[in-house]
């Protein structure tokens, strides 16, 4: 049985106090919930990791980084390595987010290097893929997603691939208030699962969690998460409100 996952990506938001209040409220509310087979992951900005990790120690959620360096170690001012994050007991890492591709010039090659670094340090990788609006309008969305997945992931061994979670995040839906329809999400998730099956076989494909991301909230989550190939969500804006984030988690249970 594959894991159901709800991951919150706080991006570059919140003061330290606001972050502490948010994660404390999430932790308090999680005490009332039996997560069973569901994993909750919170991905704060780097400077808040230690504070969030301290609270996570007494709670049931896991902690993820929003990014890691493609380099091992050394003179890379401003960067944070997989080894550093692993030494702080961070378990998850988002790689390939469209904002990193767009604003920081991350290519499929750089993303593949980051994934290698992350797996070398035993992270569980939340790999993001998704098409632009122009690519969907041109009917190229399946090809775009296939190429992103093939280039970044398909040189991994089967054993390595078990540490990959895929987040399908159509770029036109991220932070726009316009989510993919449940049918659009299901169609792409089934396609992605088929790609994984053709490269790694049905067992691996059936074990891989595929999350939906893009303006997901407690109102649209019930229909989206009800799709057979949607195993949860990567949540941006709606993860900045504890009550809303908890409502989304409850949808998947
Ligand atoms: C994201 O950034 O991964 C995301 C899904 O953002 P939002 O939920 O705000 O669209």
Image (cartoon, helix red, strand yellow):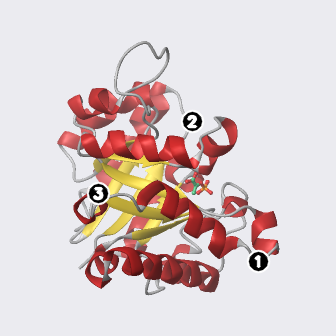
Q: Does residue 34 appear to the left or right of 48 in the view shown? A: left
Say what secondary structure mark 1 lies in.
loop
Task: Look at the picture and state if 30 lies above or below 36.
Answer: above
Please tell me in which quadrant of the rendered image residue 143 appears: bottom right
Tell me which label, 1 or 3, sits earlier in the chain: 3
Q: Nearer the viewer, mark 1 or mark 3?
A: 1
Say what secondary structure mark 3 lies in.
helix
Q: Nearer the viewer, mark 2 or mark 3?
A: 2
Under 8 Å from ligand 1: the CB of mark 2?
A: no
Task: Identify the residue at image location x=36%, y=65%.
Answer: 5
Comparing 193 with 3, the one in front is 193
Comparing 233 with 30, the one in front is 233
Marks 1 and 3 in Cβ contact (< 8 Å): no
Task: Identify the residue at image location x=28%, y=61%.
Answer: 157
Task: Look at the picture and state if 35 lies above or below 243.
Answer: below
Residue 107 screen position, x and y as percent? 60, 44
| Quarter that holds the C terminus | bottom left
Q: Which mark is residue 30?
A: 3
Under 8 Å from ligand 1: the CB of mark 1?
A: no
- Dot 1 surroundings within 10 Å: few (below 14), some, or many (20 or more)? few
Tell me which label, 2 or 3, sits earlier in the chain: 2
Residue found farthest to the left? 58
The residue tagged 2 is 13
């Amino acid at each position: 049985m594959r894991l159901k996952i709800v991951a919150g990506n706080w991006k570059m938001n919140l003061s330290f106090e606001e972050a502490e209040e948010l994660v404390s409220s999430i932790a308090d509310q999680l005490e009332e919930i039996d997560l069973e087979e569901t994993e909750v992951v919170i991905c704060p900005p780097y400077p808040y990791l230690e504070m969030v990790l301290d609270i996570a120690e007494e709670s049931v959620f896991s902690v993820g980084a929003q990014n890691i360096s493609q380099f091992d170690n050394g003179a890379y001012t401003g960067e944070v390595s997989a080894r550093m994050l692993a030494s702080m007991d961070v378990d998850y890492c988002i790689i390939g987010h469209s904002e990193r591709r767009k604003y920081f010039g991350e290519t499929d090659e750089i993303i593949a290097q980051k994934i290698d670094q992350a797996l070398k340090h035993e992270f569980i990788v939340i790999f993001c893929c998704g098409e632009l609006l122009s690519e969907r309008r041109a009917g190229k969305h399946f090809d775009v997603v296939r190429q992103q997945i093939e280039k970044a992931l398909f040189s991994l061994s089967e054993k390595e691939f078990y540490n990959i979670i895929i987040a399908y995040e159509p770029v036109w839906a991220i932070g726009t208030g316009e989510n993919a329809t449940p049918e659009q999400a299901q169609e792409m998730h089934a396609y992605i699962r088929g790609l994984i099956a053709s490269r790694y076989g049905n067992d691996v494909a059936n074990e891989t969690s595929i999350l939906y991301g893009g303006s997901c909230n407690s109102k649209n989550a019930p229909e989206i998460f009800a799709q057979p190939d949607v195993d949860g969500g990567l949540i941006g804006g709606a993860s900045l409100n504890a009550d809303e984030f908890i409502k989304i988690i409850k949808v998947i249970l």
